[in-house]
Amino acid sequence: MSPPSGSGLGGDWWDASPRPGRGDTDLHRTSRGEPIDTLREETIAYRDVYGRRRTMRARVTEDDPAADPFYRTRLVVDADRLVEYVQKRVHAAGRRAPANSAATSRAPDGIDAVDNEIQMGLHLVDAFGEENYPRELSHLVGYYPDDADREPFVLLAERGRPVERFAGRLLLDQVEQFPTSLLRALDLLESAGVVHRWLTTRTVQFDDRHVQITDFRHAVLVGERCGPAPDPRWAAPEAVYGDGPATTKEDVYSVGRVLNEVIADRSGRASTRRGGAERLLGSDGPLGRMVDHDPDLRPPAAEVLAALGRDVDRAAGTRRARSGGDARFVEGLRSFDAIVRRRGTGDDEPTPRPTTGGADRGRR
């Protein structure tokens, strides 16, 4: 599909193209190739990032056949604006079992995962603002409207395809573009105080020009204590079995692994020996330090970008006090926090005003 440039979700997400009329939907396809006019119609009620209840007249695809222990995923096209979103819905197999009063802990489930994506999405929108939201991070659009919803979901603006499809197959200019874009994405996460914890060739997406980091179900804020990393194949050594406070060094290691997987051939050399890629993967390049077993020796993303001769290009407004820039956003935080508290406790007491920083995110 060819959504219009400047979708209202933070800048140029796609190549510029004329906005089609409603009668021209048969000329458009989803990013998966389905003609929009053949999709089933559905009305979706949701809350936006400001906590306001919204209704969307949508065309929806069938669920993605890819297996996920927690989610059913489908594409949702706003029939009025012809903008495509990703909707992740918690399926029955991903929901928590009935509470066991004797249990002191339980494994995370689909509701935990979708709630965490919402919480991190709200934090990122607050950190960067709606107008300056960076294309390198998936963008929260909305979430399930209340605690009685039978199918909790999150609605996201995402683009690109999993970068695993590009491994060893990047074109000449993409060998330069991909590492630069991924490192800028990592720098954005670092500046927002977010540790993704699950950066892999499936959660990193690429649209031939720009990277986008997606799927924040396991993300935490810097300094939060967390359990073992969700996928040891991509995790930093200290995170595989660790239960200490999260640091950005974990993501530096994972990004180093992704870069090596995508732009290096089987010999470990750049698949195209050219410019920045050669400097990155060369014997004296920063990639070796990114995957060092000692986290203190791993360079931050900005340092690697500088070594490649690239600007950081960090979005304005990062690291500002949470909820400090937009009074409407306070209501969005309060709205979601109230939903989580009512579902968890049956308590309808009003939620305290959110504080700055990330220490209190209503985590369960």
Image (cartoon, helix red, strand yellow):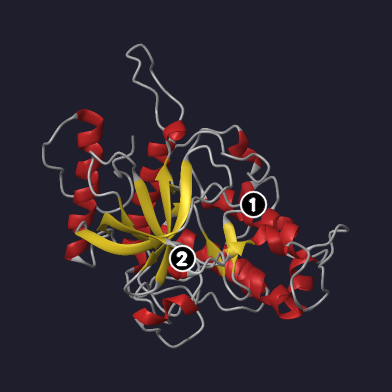
Q: How many marks?
A: 2
Q: Residue at x 65, y 79 (%)?
A: 309
Q: Is residue 68 visible?
A: yes
Q: Secondary structure at mark 2?
A: helix
Q: Residue at x 19, y 59 (%)?
A: 52
Q: Quadrant of the C terminus?
A: top left
Q: Is residue 198 left or right of residue 85?
A: right
Q: Disc 2 and disc 1: Cα gap in Å?
A: 44 Å
Q: Is residue 320 visible?
A: no
Q: Position of residue 29 (x, y in %)?
A: 51, 72
Q: Position of residue 301 (x, y in %)?
A: 58, 64
Q: Residue furthest left?
A: 349
Q: Quadrant of residue 115?
A: top left
Looking at the image, tell me whether mark 2 or mark 1 is earlier in sequence order. 2
* Above-or-below relation of 175 to 347: below
Looking at the rendered structure, the kind of residue marked 1 is Tyr
Q: Residue furthest right?
A: 267
Name the residue beneath numbered marker 1: 253
Looking at the rendered structure, the kind of residue marked 2 is Thr
Q: What is the crowding at mark 1: few (fewer than 14 residues within 10 Å), some, or many (at least 20)?
A: many
Foreground mark, 2 or 1?
2
